[in-house]
């Protein structure tokens, strides 16, 4: 699976959009970009995933660059409950499970 | 109605003891996993079972033995506990290799 690189930490004001970047410059054509988050003391939670096209669901939007070497997870209106560690992972469709890196610790402030 | 439930939530035990952590999922998934999250917060896969068959077995001491009596259960038994086994253990499940659903974790403290 391709290695991903994320900033260690980010801050965001409540109500504003949180844009979390992820670099995956070695991603291969059949690898999906997955995002999970882990709120303190809880198990990780799936957010969204995509291959080439931008994706949106009730939780977030995922923007993948045309060359697929990076992506951005967007939380359109961050709330205090979005404070968590966000993990970006590249995974093939036939790949089972994965190890999670350090992720980005997002702090949403009032 | 919890999707992936694991018990106990907290486990405090002495070195050398044997303990088990249980996991059950009611999502109808065919694949279950055990992850370990250490003090540095890295989350690493330990085992994975698909339809009760072991498909992933990472470099884990053989003191750790997973057991899957059926597709809905994957228990983790640990023999001769060591201080370094202290961590949070997460169970997860998925439909084949689709998105993962995690339990709330078991915090194991070995004294």
Image: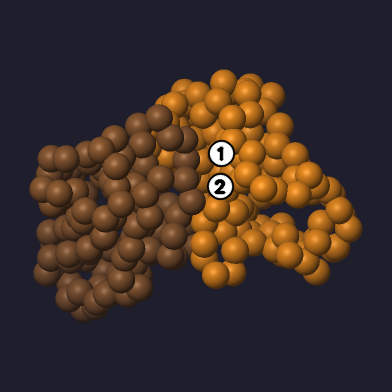
Chain colours: A brown, B orange
Q: Quadrant of the C terminus of chain A?
A: bottom left
Q: Position of residue B25 (x, y in %)?
A: 53, 32
Q: Earlier in the sequence, mark 1 or mark 2?
A: 1
Element under label 1?
strand
Label 1 marks a residue whose chain is B
Task: Say whether residue B2 is visible.
Answer: no
Task: Say whether residue A31 is visible.
Answer: yes
Q: Is residue A36 left or right of residue A12?
A: right
**Going 55% across and 25% down the picture, which residue do you hit?**
B50
**Going 29% across and 47% down the picture, which residue do you hit?**
A27
Q: Is residue A99 left or right of residue B37?
A: left
Tell me the tag on residue A3.
Answer: none
Mark 1 crowd level (few <14, some 14–19, many ≥20, 10 Å Cα): many
Q: Nearer the viewer, residue B83 or A99?
A: A99
Q: Is B7 rendered above or below residue A86?
A: above
Mark 2 crowd level (few <14, some 14–19, many ≥20, 10 Å Cα): many
Residue B62 lies in what quarter of the image? top right
Q: Position of residue B26 (x, y in %)?
A: 50, 29
Q: Position of residue B11 (x, y in %)?
A: 71, 57
Q: Which residue is mark 2?
A: B45
């Amino acid at each position: 699976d391709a290695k991903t690189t994320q900033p260690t930490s980010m801050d965001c004001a409540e109500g504003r959009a949180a844009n979390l970047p992820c670099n995956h410059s070695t991603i291969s054509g059949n690898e999906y970009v997955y995002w999970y988050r882990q709120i303190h003391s809880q198990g990780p939670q799936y957010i969204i995933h995509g291959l080439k096209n931008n994706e949106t669901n009730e939780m977030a939007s995922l923007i993948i660059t045309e060359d697929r070497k990076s992506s951005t997870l967007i939380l359109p209106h961050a709330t205090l409950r979005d404070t968590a560690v966000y993990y970006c992972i590249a995974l093939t469709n036939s790949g089972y499970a994965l190890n999670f890196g350090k992720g980005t610790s997002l702090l949403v402030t009032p | 109605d919890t999707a992936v439930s694991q018990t106990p939530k907290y486990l405090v035990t002495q070195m050398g003891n044997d303990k088990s952590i249980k996991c059950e999922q009611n999502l109808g998934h065919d694949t279950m996993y055990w992850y370990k999250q250490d003090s540095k917060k890295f989350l690493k896969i330990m085992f994975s079972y698909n339809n009760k068959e072991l498909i992933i077995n990472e470099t884990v001491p053989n003191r750790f033995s997973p057991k899957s009596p059926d597709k809905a259960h994957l228990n983790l038994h640990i023999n001769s506990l060591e201080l370094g086994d202290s961590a949070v253990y997460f169970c997860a499940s998925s439909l084949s290799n689709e998105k993962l659903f995690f339990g709330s974790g078991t915090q194991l403290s070995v004294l």
